[in-house]
Image (spheres, helix red, strand yellow):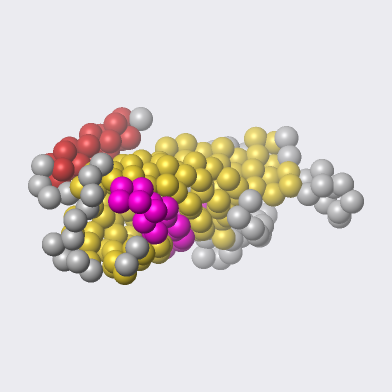
Amino acid sequence: MKKTNILLFLLLYAATACAQQRFVPGLKLGISTSQVRGDSYTGFHKAGVVGGATLTTNFNKTWSAQFEMIYVQKGSKQVYNSGTADTGFFYYLGLNYLEVPVFVQYHLHKFTFELGPSFGYLIDETEYYNTQDLTGMRPFKKTETSLSVGVSFTLFKKLGVNWRYTNSLLSIRDFAATGGTWDTEGQRNNVLAFSLTYQFKKNEPK
């Protein structure tokens, strides 16, 4: 928790300093759907929450940059119902991250296209296989580096919607040498997020 508090302090300090310049503050809140590549399960079945603060600055009428501080729930979930070969099977993995994405944005009418890296810190993890608690048996890395691509649409002057896909660039947990079916390159997060966005004042391009 000490590392988390230090990170939060640094992020808040940076946000305050930037806000005093030409950055426009905002908020975002939505849902995440995720899977973990390399865990032998498929599908974005794990639902979660994504939300936090944003700071945006314009370079000109076409280009801008956005800095965020967000909380994201990731992981994996699989449930096989009766009538299948895996009757009663259940797997759940919950990974909660504090993330700092940095985006370059391109504006086209009411659309904004974004691309950039994201740096995350794993706050906590939960893992179950049927009724067996596997949490911590093979711990995940505390930090994550990922790449995100997304698009936003302006509904009104200050309100918009955002869609984003995020993929880990480096493994979040290494390959299991024995007794595992994971990809030899390790496991990686894949996340689709859908959010409402709000800016406290209109972000006027230069």
In the picture shown, does residue 15 fall above or below 63?
above
Q: Is 86 included in the stretch rendered in magenta? A: no
Q: What is the quadrant of the C terminus in the image? A: bottom left
Q: Is 160 included in the stretch rendered in magenta? A: yes
Q: Residue at x 69, y 49 (%)?
A: 78
Q: Residue at x 36, y 56 (%)?
A: 154
Residue 127: percent from left, percent from top:
60, 40
**Is 111 left or right of 81, judged from the image as shown?**
left
Q: Residue at x 70, y 36 (%)?
A: 132
Residue 48: percent from left, percent from top:
53, 43
In the picture shown, does residue 153 fall above or below 82?
below
Residue 84: percent from left, percent from top:
86, 54
Question: In this figure, what is the number of numbered marks?
Answer: 0
Residue stretch in magenta: 152-175
Q: Residue at x 64, y 58 (%)?
A: 43
**Is 201 left or right of 174, judged from the image as shown?**
left
**Is 39 left or right of 24, judged from the image as shown?**
right
Closer to us: 46 or 151 = 151
